[in-house]
């Protein structure tokens, strides 16, 4: 028996022990009506985690019972995203694969006197449903004979009635304290082309009725879903019992993932895309998996985050800083280092020979056991970041100041001898001298210099747009504040920077730590390469 690490695994363990089930089969059930987001990553990790742990199965199940919103484009994107996370599903199934079976099961319910055709409009049905304190009213069509119901239901399928003119309802209990059990609609008439079955059907089953059937027909043993379905479980079980499913799949609910400063509702994400507030579903600020991937968030870091937040039964909100910490931890261990400056400031090294280019060793990742280095160029003209020089430094300022010294990463100690300003007093160039004996790795200068800063060499540095991001949503000012009021209008900051050529070559998706700046990757924005932030770096120099 495996060791249970959460309540779902505890349930499965006890079922395996008591023999209620003897294999484990889950499914991930997206509706192909949009892109997956980080909340779905949690559901994926749980469903595929159970499969791996129990050596069971996990299907990819597309819940496509709502043809008006579903598209093949979303099916394809969902599959890409799951593959990116590294999960392999056993079978790819669709609710629409089972439309015929679902229909036949409805016929069985009618024959058993458990379902009836109702002529009330959707508005009337919802008006008669009652409330939490009042029972609902029975439909006047509730006691139609089995023969009449069968006749009408077949006619519904044949297209004899207008959309919405009739529906099929389960006959359960209009006085049930659970509103989902008050004769719920299980089939509706809808003339809508389906992305897979085309115009074959003009009636479609409702999710709550179709889902337990699809689970059963796939051999799913544990139907894992989020807490909002808890109230739907009695209906899930009712369908299984009335249709005599054995073994009956079991629904278990877990808490949704919510993350501060992230929009997690598909509806609202769609709005952001449609209003152009973001540049599409894969905008690097989006919490969609396609956005996170394009942003450069490693799949491993995302899975690590999901596993660390765990599986619980109560809804809660996870701090976005926790996700960022997981990403940072992964990239700190795995990303190559490179240098770049967001705000280039020219530095001329007066005592360095004109035209000389020296090749220095640059350590690729200090966390690696076996040290690897690559060569970087050093020459008379270099650029440092404007923020690493101050004309009026505060006490204990260890970066560069007039007459002060600083070490250039992997190179030499330099001293600032002179400052060139423009007519507005803005510093536009530094005239420095370098200490030849202070070469990194072979420093015999005896100088003690506290600050180390990054730089790039004029000869090969590439001018490039560098983008840093803020969160799409600002902090909540009061609980439940509307997303629209929290939109961060300033979530992209653009710099005209310079980077080492290294980061402009090779794999676009390779992550780099730009030293003292953050983790970045290249991004293709309308055919133009941009250096785009993955996650910030904890800065040693608090501003
Ligand atoms: P919709 O907004 O259309 O209801 P949804 O976010 O519920 O979409 P589905 O495609 O229905 O998305 O979800 C697929 C699976 O992912 C479901 O089992 C759902 O419970 C789960 N899921 C969705 N959002 C989250 C979340 N934030 N945390 C954990 N699981 C989630
Ligand atoms: Mg849903």
Image (cartoon, grey):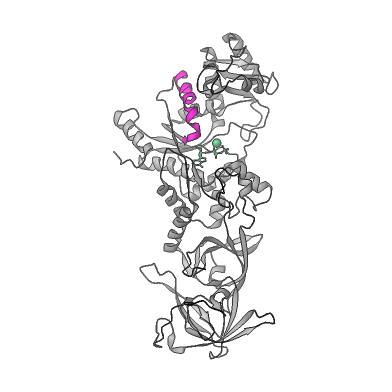
Q: Position of residue 244 (x, y in %)?
A: 44, 19
Residue 321 to residue 500: above or below: above
Q: Position of residue 285 (x, y in %)?
A: 58, 54
- Look at 43% across and 78% down and name the residue there: 450
Magenta stretch: includes residue 365: no
Residue 126, quarter of picture: top right
Residue 41 to residue 450: above or below: above
Using residue 448 as the reference point, say whether residue 510 is left or right of it. Answer: right
- Look at 39% across and 40% down and name the residue there: 50
Q: Position of residue 96 (x, y in %)?
A: 57, 31
273 vs 345, nearest the viewer: 345
Using residue 10 as the reference point, say whether residue 373 is left or right of it. Answer: right
Q: Main secondary structure of the magenta part?
A: helix
Residue 134, quarter of picture: top right
Magenta stretch: includes residue 236: yes
- Look at 52% across and 58% down and name the residue there: 296
Magenta range: 225-243
Q: Position of residue 203 (x, y in %)?
A: 63, 24
Using residue 418 as the reference point, say whether residue 55 is left or right of it. Answer: left
Residue 324 to residue 457: above or below: above
């Amino acid at each position: 028996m495996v060791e249970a690490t959460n309540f779902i695994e505890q349930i499965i363990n006890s079922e395996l022990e008591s023999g209620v089930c003897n294999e484990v089969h889950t499914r991930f059930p997206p509706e192909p009506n949009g892109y997956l987001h980080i909340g779905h990553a949690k559901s994926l990790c749980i469903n595929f985690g159970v499969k791996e742990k129990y050596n069971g199965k996990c299907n990819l199940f597309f819940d496509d019972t709502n043809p008006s919103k579903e598209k093949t484009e979303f099916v394809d994107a969902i599959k890409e995203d799951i593959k990116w996370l590294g999960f392999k599903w056993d079978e790819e199934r669709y609710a629409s694969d089972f439309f015929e079976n679902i229909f036949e099961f409805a016929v069985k319910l009618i024959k058993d006197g458990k379902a009836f055709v109702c002529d009330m409009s959707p508005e009337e049905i919802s008006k008669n449903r009652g409330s939490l304190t009042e029972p609902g009213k029975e439909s006047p069509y509730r006691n139609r004979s089995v023969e009449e119901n069968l006749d009408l239901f077949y006619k519904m399928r044949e297209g004899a009635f207008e959309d919405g003119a009739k529906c099929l309802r389960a006959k359960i209990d209009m006085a049930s304290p659970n509103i989902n059990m008050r004769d719920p609609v299980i089939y509706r008439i809808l003339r809508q082309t389906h992305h897979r079955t085309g115009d074959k059907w003009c009636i479609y089953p409702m999710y709550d009725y179709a889902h337990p059937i699809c689970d059963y027909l796939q051999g799913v043993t544990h139907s894992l879903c989020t807490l909002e379905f808890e109230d739907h479980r009695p209906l899930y079980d009712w369908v299984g019992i009335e249709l005599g499913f054995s073994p009956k799949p079991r629904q278990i609910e877990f808490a949704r993932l919510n993350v501060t400063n992230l929009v997690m509702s598909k509806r609202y994400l769609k709005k952001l895309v449609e209003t152009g507030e973001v540049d599409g579903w894969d905008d690097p600020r989006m919490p969609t998996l396609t956005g996170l991937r394009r942003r450069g968030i490693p799949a491993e870091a995302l899975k690590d985050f999901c596993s660390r937040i765990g599986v619980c039964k109560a809804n809660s909100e996870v701090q976005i800083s926790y996700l960022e910490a997981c990403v940072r931890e992964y990239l700190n261990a795995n990303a190559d280092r490179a240098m770049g400056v967001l705000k280039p400031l020219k530095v001329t090294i007066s005592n360095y020979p004109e035209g000389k280019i020296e090749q220095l060793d640059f350590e690729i990742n200090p966390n690696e056991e076996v040290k690897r280095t690559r060569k970087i160029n050093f020459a008379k003209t270099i650029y440092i970041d404007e923020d690493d020089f101050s004309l009026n430094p505060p006490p204990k300022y260890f970066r560069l100041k007039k007459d002060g010294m600083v070490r250039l990463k992997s190179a030499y100690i330099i001293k600032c001898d002179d400052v060139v300003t423009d007519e507005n007093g803005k510093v536009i160039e530094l005239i420095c001298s370098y200490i030849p004996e202070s070469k990194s790795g072979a420093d015999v200068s005896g100088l003690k210099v506290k600050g180390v800063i990054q730089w790039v060499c004029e000869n090969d540095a590439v001018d490039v747009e560098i983008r840093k991001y803020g969160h799409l949503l600002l902090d909540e000012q009061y609980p439940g504040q509307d997303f629209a009021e929290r939109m961060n209008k300033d979530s992209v900051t653009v710099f005209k920077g310079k980077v080492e050529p290294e980061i402009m070559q090779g794999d676009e998706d390779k992550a780099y730590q730009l030293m003292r700046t953050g983790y970045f990757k290249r991004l293709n924005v309308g055919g133009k390469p941009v250096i785009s932030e993955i996650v910030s770096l904890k800065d040693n120099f608090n501003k």
